[in-house]
Amino acid sequence: MTKILQFSDLHADSAKRQAVLNIAKSTNPSASFDLGDEIEAREFYPEVFSKINIPIPKEVIDDINRAKELNSEQELIKALQKHEATLAQLRQGVENAVIEQLKVEGSKLEEELYSRLKEINPVYGVLGNHDPYALKKFTPSVTYIDESDPVKVNDHSIAGVVNSDEFVSEKFLHLYPHLTRDINNKNVDEVSQHTGKSIDELLQNSAEYQRLHDKNFTIVASHKTVLPNSYGTGIAASKLAKEKGVKLNMCGHRHKGSVERIEGVLMVNSSPNIAYVVDIDDMTVDVYWISSDKEGFARNKFEKAA
Ligand SMILES: [Zn+2]
């Protein structure tokens, strides 16, 4: 029996962190997998930004507005180039402020959950779309597998991937470099047209494909599912899952706990209210409610792999 605990999307809820810890204590899994979105980045952003006291020079605003009024991409590029140094300074200011905030949020997460979980078993993770890249720096108890080789849990080889994202505004993409490593299934045609490269070419050249195409694994841990869906999944990750004959995809993001079989692959999708303990030898799944009113109630084994 190789049990692993999977959870995701707790979004800075301390009570839920405690509930996850309790599940780990009572089930003693071989490893825990955190599939991302444990902090509430979008919530703290307005707060962070309101504290950033970096005046944008009037000349910069005027030049950019003029280009926008002319509706000219060329003029806009010219304006951005002209003020490159100032804009870089502003970006750095934003980044510093976000890192300051992450120091607080990430350290609390590390303290409340990860360091305690790690006393029980190894903690592996992938970042979610709410998690700025710098979160890794403040959560040392987690072994992030979204940039590394697959990890082994007993005989099972498990790869982590980060999926493309549709939410992060371009202005802040430099805080989320992990979200651009794969190609988003929502805009792949557009990218293909824009770059003049075929979809196949884009796929082969994507960082995710390069990293994993010569590795073996049968399980994928991801924030968004790598199985066919419409949620902006990275398509190189999907291609890899198919090529490798992946049998299990542990994922989160949708906030709808579910266990489904999609094209022969078991998809276990944790949510803010449901964590799972998956026996990856025989592919059975135990369900755990982690919302405060239901914690510990549902413990049904309800999925047996065919
Ligand atoms: Zn998400």
Image (tube, rainbow, N blue to C red):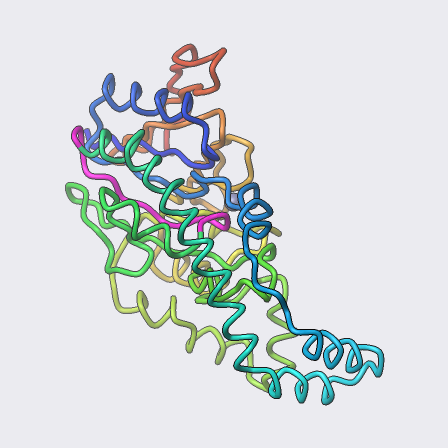
In the displayed structure, 149 sits above or below 89; it is above
The N terminus - image quarter: top left
Magenta segment range? 119-131
Q: Is residue 282 magenta?
A: no
| Name of the residue lying farthest toward the right | 69
Task: Please tell me which residue lies in front, 294 or 81.
Answer: 81
| Residue 164 in the image, given as x and y percentages of width and height | 51, 59
Q: Is residue 205 left or right of residue 56?
A: left
Please state the horizontal and vertical placement of residue 257, each as a whole percent of the image: 51, 30
User: Which quarter of the rendered picture does the C terminus lie within?
Assistant: top left
Residue 149: where, in percent of width, then height?
24, 60
Residue appearing at x 56%, y 41% in the figure: 43
Label the magenta part by its dominant secondary structure. loop
Query: As rendered, which of 108 and 127 lies closer to the eye?
Result: 108
Q: Is residue 121 magenta?
A: yes
**Residue 94 point in image, percent of width and height:** 51, 60
Which corner quadrant of the image does residue 216 belong to? bottom left
Q: Quadrant of residue 63?
A: bottom right
**Can you say whether 207 is above or below 140 in the image?**
below
Q: How many marks?
A: 0
Q: Which residue is depicted at the point 60% across and 54% down?
A: 167
